[in-house]
Each structure stands twice: as structure tokens, then as C-alpha cells.
Amino acid sequence: MSNRITLRRAAEEDQRAINRLIREGGINPLGTHWSRFVVALDENGTPVGCGQVKAHRDGSRELASLAVSRTWRRRGVAGGIVGRLKQIHGQPLWLTCIDRLVPFYERQAFERITNPRQMPTYFRRASRLFNLYLLLTRGKGELAVMVWDGRKDEKFDQSGVYEIS
């Protein structure tokens, strides 16, 4: 299996593949319109990963729905998608994730925000509701809110063709 992928903005014909990747990743399928997505394609043009940025009423933008096909996980695809979305949308980008995923997003230059006063309204509410749900259901972990504000310098290949290891 080659390690070469191409990253591009999704097209309408990618919607089925996006839905498949979202289902495979166990991600909430609400709000997954192809027009907000970037897709990662293998050398055969098959979508192997996707991610989107969603705008919220409070003006914040959320990196969301990051999903990679099982056979392509732990090979840099997710990092490539995150990098392309950051390049397209600029900062700040916010996200929520289960706390065990914080180290991955820290490697992508996101910073965890723990003070609710520093969060946009959408993320402050989401954090409170989800953590209350976990408390009531005795769930494990907690929801982390993170932001990329562009302060950490990084370089990203502009071509969209990306060799992963």
C-alpha cells in the first residue's frame, strides 16, 4: 500500500464516502454537508479520510468530524487533514474532543482551554452539558475544549499532495 495521499476540498459526489467515514469512525453524523469538508484520497482516488470546519452562531468556527479509514489510521492522514483545514480557514479554530485525544491535537498546535470564560459561547455550553452528562452517567473522561490561534509556527505543503510515513 502506497503512502501517498491527496488532500482536496470535497465535492458533492464525495458525500457518500464522507457519510461512510463518519459512520466508521463512530462520529455524530449531524451537520456533515460535503461543502464544509476536506477529503484525503489514496492513489486510486478513493476517500480515506475527511474533516470539516463548521461555523457557529456566536462566530466561532469548529474543526469537526475528523475521520480516517481504519487501514489508513496512524499514518499521518488526520494530521494532513487538520493542516489543510487550518490553511483554508485560518485561526482561530476551536474543537471539542475526549480528553484522551488531547495529545494528538496538541501535536497539531492546538491548546487546551480550561477556563470557560476564555471559550466562545457555543463551546462553553457544550463543555458544561457534556461534562454534566458524564457526571450523571458515571462516564469516564471529560470533554476537552481546544483552540488553534496560529501562535505556534508551522509549515504545510501547499500542493495538496502529501507523502505520509
Image (tube, rainbow, N blue to C red):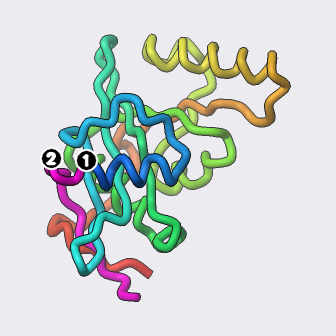
Horizontal and vertical percent position of residue 153: 35, 54
Q: Is mark 1 on a helix, strand or loop?
A: helix
| Quadrant showing the C terminus | bottom left
Left or right of residue 12, residue 6 in this image: right
Q: In this view, does 90 lie to the left or right of 153?
A: left
Q: Quadrant of the N terminus?
A: bottom left
Magenta stretch holds residue 42: no
At label 2, counting other C-alpha atoms closer than 10 Å, the crowd grade (few under 14, some 14-19, many 20 or more) is: few
Against 17, is 142 above or below? Answer: above
Answer whether labels 1 and 2 touch (C-beta < 8 Å).
Answer: yes
Mark 1: amino acid: Gln
Left of 126 or right of it: where is 39? Answer: left
The residue that disc 2 covers is 12
Q: Identify the residue at image location x=31%, y=30%.
A: 54
**Residue under the point 44% across and 69% down:** 76
Give the vertical position of 163 relative to 92 (above or below). Answer: below
Depth check: 131 or 14 in front? 14
Residue type of the residue flagged with mark 2 = Glu
Residue 5, percent across and down? Answer: 29, 74
* Left or right of 102, for residue 82: left
Q: Where does residue 6 sit, x and y in percent of width and height?
A: 23, 70
Q: Which residue carries the number 1 mark?
A: 15
Looking at the image, is 125 positioned above or below residue 107? above
Residue at horizontal 19 percent and vertical 51 percent from the top: 10
In this view, 11 is above or below 130: below
Q: Distance between the residues labelled 1 and 2?
A: 6 Å
In this picture, which residue range is highlighted in magenta?
1-15
Secondary structure state at the residue bearing disc 2: helix
Front position in the image: 36 or 122:
36
At horizontal 80% and vertical 30% (from top left) the residue drawn is 139
